């Protein structure tokens, strides 16, 4: 273009272009790399594709994830939602630079809550916020999320990856999720039919799951070399034991609900036995838990010994080897435990419901 034509451009137009170029440069200089975000999306697509269900109407990249309910054969459909994060367990993932399992934790903490109502998880969304976006690290995290969604039978239909320099340290991130499930209104499990004489069945956990890690981190060093030490009682390194992902109970519980009358379900997360089991019990009743009726996992014995933590505090913080508790009729308890075994899980008769106050007694 001739130089003279450039001179005849309005001054405001030339200023606008200069400002636009400065803004683009400033955003990258501020620590936000848009192209890294694009790369992360491309890398995660193949993992997300594994979670798809026919009800999903949108592909990754839209402003909202669409999920059709028109072919869901439920007479009185009720949507059941749950949200949670991985918490400070992430600090151990940072220390060991291992990010392949925390996505499973994120999904598990949400879907395990949703199935306490007897709801079938439909879809999941994630939120990853980081100080500096590493596309390959994000891909690894999303692969774990996708693994969790596949195990839970739900679709990963959306999410957000936010690069927030100055808010998070460069090599750290936070991870949270949101799940929606569906149940028939007439079949929702809410604990309202639990009565004195009902039995309590505990389904084994895979380890510490994703709660109590502020206390765990106070007891054990976050130094990588310490976490990589082998403990014979754990039959693994400390880091391997602590990063074992949260067990997903969706398929087990849904199989049970189809075959038996499950009256109440409690997901043993933050607050351990003492906070969570009473949440499924009506007033005037209490849960009596019998110690010694299931094997307490070695990792909890190590935590108790190394931290000099009393038994009450252990039961008030950790799952102690039981990740899910079911309230069932007395005459079905034995058959249900056998059926859970056939599904590949370990289950134990750990207590019963009695009349009384105090909500829970561990004896």
Image (cartoon, rainbow, N blue to C red):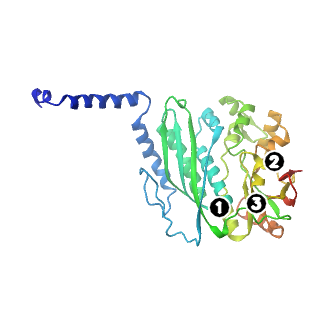
Q: Is residue 325 left or right of residue 153?
A: right
In the depicted view, which residue is nearer to us: 237 or 320?
A: 320
Q: What element carries label 2?
A: loop
Given the current orientation, which residue lies at the most extreme right position?
363
Residue in the picture at 54% in, 32% down: 168
- Asked if disc 1 and disc 2 are in contact, CB closer than 8 Å, the reply is no
Q: Whole-Å distance between the Cαs marked 2 and 3?
A: 18 Å
Dot 1 or dot 3: first in sequence order is 1
Rendered location of residue 188, percent (x, y): 67, 65
- How many residues crowd mark 3 within 10 Å: few (<14), some (14–19), many (20+)? many
Q: Is residue 2 left or right of residue 153?
A: left
- How many residues crowd mark 2 within 10 Å: few (<14), some (14–19), many (20+)? some
Dot 2 or dot 3: first in sequence order is 2
Dot 1 or dot 2: first in sequence order is 1
Q: Quadrant of residue 32?
A: top left
Q: Whole-Å distance between the Cαs marked 1 and 2?
A: 24 Å
In the depicted view, which residue is nearer to us: 88 or 149?
A: 88
Q: Which label lies toward us, 2 or 3?
A: 3
Rendered location of residue 74, percent (x, y): 58, 71
Rendered location of residue 347, percent (x, y): 77, 58
Q: Circle 1 sits on which residue?
A: 251
Disc number for residue 296: 2
Q: Quadrant of the N terminus?
A: top left
- Asked if disc 2 and disc 3 are in contact, CB closer than 8 Å, the reply is no
Q: Is mark 3 on a helix, strand or loop?
A: strand
Q: Circle 3 sits on which residue?
A: 326
In the depicted view, which residue is nearer to us: 86 or 178?
A: 178
Q: Quadrant of residue 353?
A: bottom right
Residue in the picture at 47% in, 39% down: 135
């Amino acid at each position: 273009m001739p130089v003279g034509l450039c001179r005849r451009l309005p001054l405001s137009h030339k200023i606008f272009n200069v400002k636009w170029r400065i803004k683009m440069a400033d955003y990258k200089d501020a620590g936000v790399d848009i192209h890294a975000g694009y790369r992360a999306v491309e890398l995660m697509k193949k993992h997300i594709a594994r979670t798809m269900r026919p009800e999903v109407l949108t592909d990754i990249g839209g402003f909202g994830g669409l999920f059709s309910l028109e072919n869901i054969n439920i007479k009185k459909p009720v949507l059941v939602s749950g949200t949670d994060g991985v918490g400070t367990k992430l600090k151990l993932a940072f220390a060991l630079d291992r990010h392949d399992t925390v996505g499973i934790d994120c999904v598990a903490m949400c879907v395990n809550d949703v199935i306490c109502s007897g709801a079938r998880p439909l879809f999941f969304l994630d939120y990853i916020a980081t100080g500096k976006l590493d596309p390959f690290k994000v891909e690894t995290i999303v692969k774990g999320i996708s693994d969790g969604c596949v195990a839970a039978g739900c679709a990963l239909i959306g999410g957000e990856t936010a690069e927030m320099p100055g808010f998070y340290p460069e090599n750290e991130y936070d991870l949270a999720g949101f799940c929606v499930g569906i149940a028939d209104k007439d079949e929702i499990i809410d604990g309202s039919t639990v009565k004195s004489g009902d039995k309590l069945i505990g389904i084994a956990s895979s380890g510490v799951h994703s709660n109590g890690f502020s206390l765990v981190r106070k007891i054990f060093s976050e130094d990588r070399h310490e976490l990589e030490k082998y403990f014979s009682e754990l039959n693994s390194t400390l880091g391997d034991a602590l990063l074992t992902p949260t067990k997903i109970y969706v398929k087990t519980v849904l199989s049970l609900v189809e075959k038996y009358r499950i009256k109440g379900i409690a997901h043993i997360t933050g607050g351990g036995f003492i906070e969570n089991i009473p949440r499924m019990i009506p007033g005037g009743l209490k849960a009596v838990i019998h110690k010694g009726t299931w094997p307490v996992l070695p990792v909890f014995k190590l935590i108790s010994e190394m931290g000099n933590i009393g038994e009450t505090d252990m039961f008030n913080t950790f799952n102690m080897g039981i990740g899910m508790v079911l309230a069932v009729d007395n005459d079905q308890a034995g058959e249900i435990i056998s059926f859970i075994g056939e599904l590949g899980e370990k289950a134990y008769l750990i207590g019963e419901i009695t009349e009384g106050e105090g909500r829970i007694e561990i004896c």
